[in-house]
Amino acid sequence: MGNAFAAAWPERNVTVIVPYAPGGQGDVFARLVGDRLARALGQPVIVDNRPGASGALGARLVARAPADGHTLLLGQTGEIAINGTAMKNPGYDALKDLRAVALVGNAPLVLTVPSDSPFRSVADLVEGARDKPGGVAYASSGTATPGHLAAAALATGTRTEMTHVPYKGAGQAITDLIGGQVQFFFASASSIVPHLQGGRVRALAVSTPARVASLPRVPPVADTLPGFDFSLWGGYFAPRATPDEVVRRLNTEIDRIVVEPELKARFEAEGSAVTPMTPERFERFVRDEIAKYARLIKATGTTLE
């Protein structure tokens, strides 16, 4: 499959598999981009939600699909960078079976505490954990999620003992954070900003190395723990053998779409930075993320079944 194939592509619907249930941030973004991508390609773009196994079910479907550019994955941090190490047998290899096409967005996690917490900074939190080993508990929206692993990295990096309390999603985690049952939570910006605005929680730091536009007064964790860098990111992936010409066309169109003022503003309102990359640069980014999470997962003994 070469230039002649690429010139004829797409010949039919392009299906974007979202490995989570409808209504989540990734699903919404897939539909917003998909509508515009359909107009650019001249063929319908169908969003197909295939939740299950922490995103592994949908990722497997794309890994095994024909490499003809008609099946894509809207992949996020978990199924691309985490599952391969945390799961005993995810059924796919993100590097061998999938090809990075285009990064859509990259959002920070926000280290939040209850509004009445005695901790006013990351340094305060770390000192509290040192004073009372195991006495500082953190919520996560599930084991081996980016928020869980970011908190584990904070504990590991500061040589403190903190207690992990996993929840099935962010909703109950935030409820218990507000109620003081847990002392902190690395939450997605989209889930926590309404509670920050309502004064029910406070933000101590963001997980990215630089401050973010939506929370300009909140410092990075890296100011206290240099090198700390965790985020929620999502992008498009294709079966590994998808032709270069198709990947380049998709990358060009998606990069153009995500910087459209209306869509860019929508992403940024959800706390997500729009940072277009070439397929080659995105591939390097993915490799670095997989290596980073693999080191942390192995060091902490985290497993996901």
Image (spheres, helix red, strand yellow):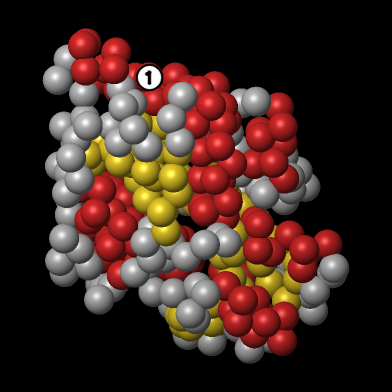
Residue 135, how many percent across, how many down? 53, 87
Amino acid type, callout 1: Arg
* Above or below, 108 relative to 280: below
The quadrant holding residue 128 is bottom right
Quadrant in which the C terminus appears: bottom left
Nearer the observer, 122 or 20: 20
Quadrant in which the N terminus appears: top left
Nearer the observer, 227 or 84: 84
Nearer the observer, 247 or 86: 247
* Above or below, 36 relative to 151: above
Q: Which residue is rendered at x = 65% and y = 56% of the image?
A: 189
Q: Which residue is rendered at x = 69% and y = 86% of the image?
A: 180
* Above or below, 118 relative to 81: below
The quadrant holding residue 295 is bottom left
Q: Which residue is rendered at x = 45% and y = 24% of the image?
A: 41
Q: Is residue 212 visible?
A: no
Residue located beneath label 1 in the image: 249
Identify the element where label 1 is drawn. helix
Q: Residues within 10 Å of mark 1 (few under 14, many from 20)?
A: some
